[in-house]
Image: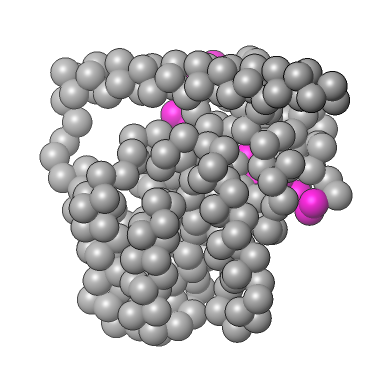
Amino acid sequence: MKIDQKKLRELLLAPAFSLSPDQLRREGNVFLVGGNLPERQTLETLYDSHYQSNAALFHLTFGKVDQFGSGEALARVIKKNFNVHLAATLDFPAPSHLIERAYAAGVDILDIPLPAPGIAAEHAKERFKALNIARSVFPRWSVVSTLVAGEEPPAVTIAGIDALLASEVIPLVVLSQRAARHPDDEIARIFTHLQAGWRRHRCVLKPLLPLIRLTTPLVPAAPRNMLRGFIDSIEDRRLLAASDLRRILRVKEVAESFDSAGL
């Protein structure tokens, strides 16, 4: 991938990318689904749009911890009705039982964002604990943490990228509204470091590429031709089938463990 300077300038001038548990919208080929939305109406809207033009990724944003069940139900409905990767964001330090439930419901990729600058260090520690729990539940390189760049010096964001990669968590970076106060080349340095880290650690990025293209200035290094598109579609199906099979086996293993314990 490479940095598109024109796209970088557009992102710096545009409103900051945000997710909401109370909104449903489509941006490009990504569905952004709020976890607090009603199932039936949401499913009807997804059907109408998806089958006019297939979305490459569904992204579910869970609400607060006491609203988890609503997002969990939507995750099950989406996986039952659409053969696509489902990413999800839990914007709180989720306990292990909720992370297990999110995975069992059909979430393929889980994002637990690190807190914004200025939040107490204790909150960051709680998020890292949740990320480590998620790593024990989800397949390797299926746990993500989003960093917000622009609120603090780029070196701080770069250090965060390195810390996440060292923990086998995929870092994603979105730009804050204040990122424009930094020189373009400093912001570009963050994304250069990000993609170098992905490559060095051999992160599995393919399911996340639609989101990366939507939220960052990173674009494919070479145009996508028909053969490349065909190969990519085969690889997407392979990754999705492997993810679904692993989930079935893990859920079965957990159920058998409870049965043997008499629970």
In this view of the protein, which residue sits in the foreground, 121 or 263?
A: 263
Whether residue 53 is visible: no
In this view of the protein, which residue sits in the foreground, 211 or 181?
A: 211
In the image, residue 41 above or below residue 220: above
Quarter-of-image position of residue 40: top right
Position of 2 compared to 7: left or right? Answer: left
User: How many marks are shown on the rendered structure?
Assistant: 0
Residue 160, image x, y percentages: 41, 70
Secondary structure mainly formed by the magenta segment: loop
Residue 35, image x, y percentages: 73, 41
User: Which residue occupies the extreme left position in the image?
Assistant: 222
In the image, residue 186 above or below residue 96: below
Task: Please tell me which residue is depicted at 66% across the width and 42% down the height of the picture.
Answer: 99
Magenta-tinted stretch: 51-65
Whether residue 154 appears in magenta in the rendering, the answer is: no
Whether residue 247 is visible: yes
Residue 179, image x, y percentages: 43, 76
Quarter-of-image position of residue 116: bottom right
Task: Please tell me which residue is depicted at 24% across the width and 16% down the height of the picture.
Answer: 230
Task: Please tell me which residue is depicted at 16% across the width and 45% down the height of the picture.
Answer: 221
Residue 92, image x, y percentages: 69, 58
